[in-house]
C-alpha cells in the first residue's frame, strides 16, 4: 500500500547564512514565522502562523473580552492577508451566543469573508466579519452538543505597528425587563396593566396590575430560543400595598406545541414591602420556548394591586471553549 506524506519545511532554530546579492532565503523559524533573509543579513517576516496547542484550550466566560492566547500576531504597516480557522464549542451546560472580532492597530478592512460549519446541536450563524469594534463581528449561537468550525479570510491595510488578533465574547440567554416602559411585550389576563412611577424597585417606573376580581390576575411574556436542559433562574420583585395570600411567578416550558412542565415560586406577600420571588432550576430537555407568568392567584378581590419590577429569566451556565487546532495566519502582501 502506498502512503503519501505531505511535504513540510524544516523549522530552523537559527537563521541561515545571508544569500548572495540578488537572492533571498525563505526559512521557517521555530515560532511559526516564515522569514525572508536578505543579502545584507536582515530578515523580514513574510508570514506568521499561530495556533492553540494540541494540549490546550481556552475558555471564554461571559463578561470577558481579550485576544485568545496563541492567536495574536505582531504586524507592521502595510497590506496583510489574514486567514483563521476557529474550532469552538459550548463549554459547560447551556447554549451560548459566540461573537468574534478581528481587531488590532489602526487599519482598514479591505475585504472579508466568513463561513461557519456546525456538527450536531442547535446552532445557526448570522452577521458578518468586520475589523475594529466588537459590534461588527462574526456572531452565532452554538448549542451544548455542537462544534462550530469558523473560517475567516480577510485583507487588512494596517497603518501603524501593533498586534492583530481575534477577540471572542460570549453571551448567555437572558431576558430582563426593568418594566420602565410598563407592560410592553407582555399580555395580561384577569387584570388591567398600567405604568406607575410610585412605588418602584429600581429605575423610573414599574408595571401595576389591578385585579378584575373574577379569577387569577397575572401578566405573562413569551421567550424563544431557550436553553434546553440547562440551568436557569427566573426572578421578579413584587410589591403589594395591601398584601395577598398567593403572589409570585410561574415558568411553563414547551417544545413546539408540546407542554413539558412548569415550576413556580408562589407564597403570601406582605403589605407594603418589596419581595423577590425566585426559581432556580433546570429547563426540561428539548425545551425551545418558555412562558413566564407574574401575578396573583386564588381570585384576588377587584381592585387588588400588585406592582411588578425587575423581571429576569436567564441561563445560569454556559461558556465558550476555543479548542486545540484553532489557528491564525498573517501574511504580508
Image (tube, rainbow, N blue to C red):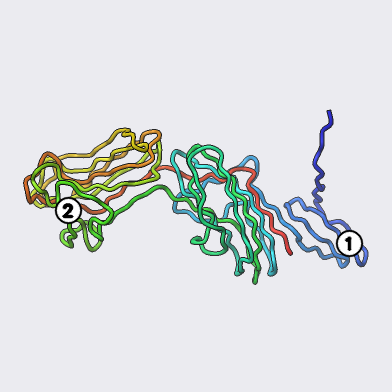
Who is closer to the viewer here, 204 or 185? 185
- Front one among 265 and 125: 125
Q: Where residue 8 sits: x, y (%)?
A: 80, 45
Image point 73% across, 52% down: which residue? 32
Q: Position of residue 135 (x, y in %)?
A: 49, 61
The residue that mark 2 highlights is 307
Q: Where is residue 55 in the image (x, y as percent from the top left)?
A: 63, 40
Mark 1 neighbour class, 10 Å CA radius: few under 14, some 14 to 19, many 20 or more = some
Q: Which residue lies furthest to the front in this view?
A: 257
Disc on the earlier residue, 1 or 2: 1
Q: Among all residues in the image, which is located at the extreme right?
A: 20
- Tell me residue 143's x, y (percent): 48, 41
Q: Residues within 10 Å of mark 2 (few under 14, many from 20)?
A: many
Q: In which quarter of the image is the N terminus?
A: top right
Q: In the shown orientation, is residue 1 left or right of residue 140?
A: right
Image position of 232 (left or right of 17): left
Pointer 1 residue: 18
**Image quarter in which the C terminus is found:** bottom right
Question: Could you tell me how far apart the alpha carbons at marks 1 and 2 are, in whole angstroms?
Answer: 80 Å
Q: Is residue 112 above or below residue 226?
A: below
- Horizontal side, residue 228 vs residue 47: left or right: left
Report how many numbered discs are placed on residues in the image: 2
> SS class of the residue under badge 1?
loop
| Dot 2: element | strand
Image side of residue 264 versus residue 330, left or right: left
- Residues 303 and 200: in front is 303
**Of tags 1 and 2, which is closer to the observer?**
2
Name the residue at the top extreme. 1
Amino acid at each position: 500500500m502506498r502512503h503519501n506524506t505531505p511535504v513540510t519545511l524544516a523549522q530552523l532554530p537559527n537563521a541561515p547564512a545571508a544569500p548572495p546579492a540578488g537572492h533571498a532565503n525563505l526559512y521557517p523559524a521555530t515560532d511559526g514565522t516564515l522569514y525572508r533573509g536578505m543579502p545584507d543579513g536582515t530578515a523580514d517576516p513574510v508570514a506568521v502562523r499561530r495556533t492553540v496547542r494540541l494540549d490546550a484550550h481556552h475558555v471564554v466566560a461571559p463578561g470577558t473580552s481579550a485576544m485568545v492566547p496563541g492567536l495574536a500576531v505582531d504586524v507592521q504597516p502595510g497590506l496583510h492577508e489574514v486567514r483563521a480557522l476557529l474550532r469552538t464549542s459550548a463549554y459547560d451546560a447551556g447554549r451560548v451566543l459566540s461573537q468574534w472580532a478581528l481587531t488590532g492597530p489602526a487599519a482598514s478592512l479591505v475585504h472579508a469573508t466568513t463561513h461557519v460549519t456546525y456538527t450536531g446541536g442547535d446552532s445557526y450563524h448570522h452577521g458578518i466579519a468586520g475589523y475594529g469594534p466588537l459590534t461588527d463581528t462574526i456572531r452565532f449561537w452554538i448549542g451544548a452538543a455542537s462544534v462550530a468550525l469558523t473560517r475567516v479570510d480577510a485583507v487588512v491595510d494596517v497603518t501603524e505597528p501593533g498586534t492583530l488578533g481575534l477577540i471572542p465574547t460570549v453571551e448567555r440567554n437572558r431576558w430582563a425587563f426593568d418594566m420602565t416602559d410598563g407592560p410592553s411585550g407582555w399580555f395580561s389576563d384577569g387584570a388591567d396593566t398600567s405604568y406607575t412611577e410610585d412605588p418602584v424597585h429600581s429605575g423610573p417606573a414599574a408595571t401595576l396590575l389591578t385585579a378584575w376580581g373574577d379569577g387569577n390576575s397575572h401578566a405573562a411574556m413569551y421567550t424563544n430560543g431557550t436553553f434546553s436542559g440547562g440551568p436557569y433562574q427566573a426572578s421578579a420583585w413584587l410589591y403589594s400595598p395591601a398584601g395577598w395570600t398567593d403572589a409570585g411567578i410561574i415558568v411553563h416550558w414547551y417544545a413546539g406545541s408540546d407542554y413539558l412542565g412548569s415550576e413556580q415560586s408562589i407564597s403570601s406577600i406582605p403589605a407594603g414591602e418589596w419581595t423577590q420571588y425566585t426559581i432556580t432550576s433546570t429547563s426540561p430537555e428539548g425545551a425551545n420556548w418558555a412562558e413566564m407568568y407574574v401575578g396573583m392567584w386564588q381570585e384576588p378581590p377587584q381592585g387588588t394591586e400588585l406592582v411588578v419590577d425587575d423581571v429576569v429569566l436567564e441561563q445560569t451556565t454556559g461558556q465558550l471553549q476555543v479548542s486545540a487546532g484553532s489557528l491564525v495566519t498573517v501574511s504580508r502582501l
